[in-house]
Image (cartoon, rainbow, N blue to C red):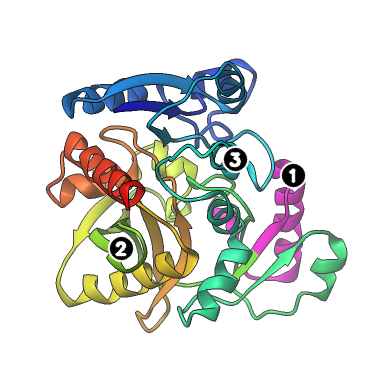
Amino acid sequence: MLIGITYDLVDDYLAAGATPEQAAAFTTPGTIDALEAAFALYGHDVERIGNLLALGKALADGKRWDLVFNLSAGAAGIAREAQVPALLEAHGIPFTFSTADVLVVSLDKALAKLVVKAAGVPTPDFAVVRNMRDLQRLNMPFPLFVKPLAESGGKGVTAASRVTDKATLANRCIDVLKLWHQPALVEAYLPGREFTVGIVGTGPSAHAIGTCEIKFGGEEDRQVYSFRTRTEGQATLSPVHGDMAAAIEDVAVRAWRALGCRDAGKVDIRYDVWSKPFFVEANPIAGLRPGESDFVVLAEHSGFSFDSLIGLILDEATGRVKG
């Protein structure tokens, strides 16, 4: 089978002037090397395609693949993760991970929360601040948590994201609007423990392969799962088992199915004050940086090597395509 790989290379964005935080969702050369080696291990031929523009040129030149392994995060807009899948869908080319519509809804955290809430999955109350009028109309009890509407990997999240009064709420929302050029998501703050759940499968076959608690070290101002704590080693993943894991995974899998995610990815969960698990967000295209990305580390804690994890994802995708 000929597998193409679509991706946005982090080095390209850093060279163009992006900060490491802005480029956090993009793929490293080492990840592409590791994927290529894993595909070869399973007997597949590989072609590196690249980003959306490279894919468009390749398609115009008549290139086709049996399957595209899609890691593209896209460069701009809330629909950015959907751009490569939409182009592949238009050409009838099968690809891994979620479809274009699912990726738009999942990246827009407010839409994702509406979908899972309608399915009966608990998620904290929220509001979206798109301008100062929205901020003036907002009436939610403190404390609150403020972050960009459509980012992942802890981007735009700091210790200042937790706000306790109107003045700091306004300042934080303004920061998000100006620095991230997108609306701010304001959520009821959940004070409990934080978890991430790895999920494999589609629809009824979707199941958790493991759950880890996110544990923090260092100073108090780093007790939030931000880009800073992720990259500076101030947060670690600790496996969770038994009844505790089962309750967390039930919420995560129900959210995954409600959103229509497929193949593999992860869902983030947080406890409220009574240790009840709540859906926070889904990541249908989880990072696959060997030894570093949460999904890979979580899988390793559950007994999966990088190669076996990639084999599991390929099995899901090819089984789905063959129908």
Quote the CA–CA distance across marks 3 and 1.
29 Å
Q: Position of residue 252 (x, y in %)?
A: 36, 68
**Disc 2 or 1, which lies upstream in sequence?**
1
Q: Which residue is the site of mark 2? A: 206
Image position of 166 (left or right of 67): right
Q: Is residue 46 in view?
A: yes
301 or 199: nearer the eye? Answer: 199
Q: Position of residue 48 (x, y in %)?
A: 42, 19
Please name the amino acid that badge 1 sits on. His
Please name the amino acid that badge 2 sits on. Ala
Q: Which residues are magenta?
A: 158-185
For disc 1, the neighbor class at 10 Å (few under 14, some 14 to 19, many from 20) is some
Quote the CA–CA distance across marks 2 and 1.
34 Å
Predominant SS of the magenta segment: helix
User: Residue 125 in magenta?
Assistant: no
Q: Which residue is the site of mark 1? A: 181
Q: Mark 2 near mark 1, Cβ–Cβ under 8 Å?
A: no
138 or 36: nearer the eye? Answer: 36
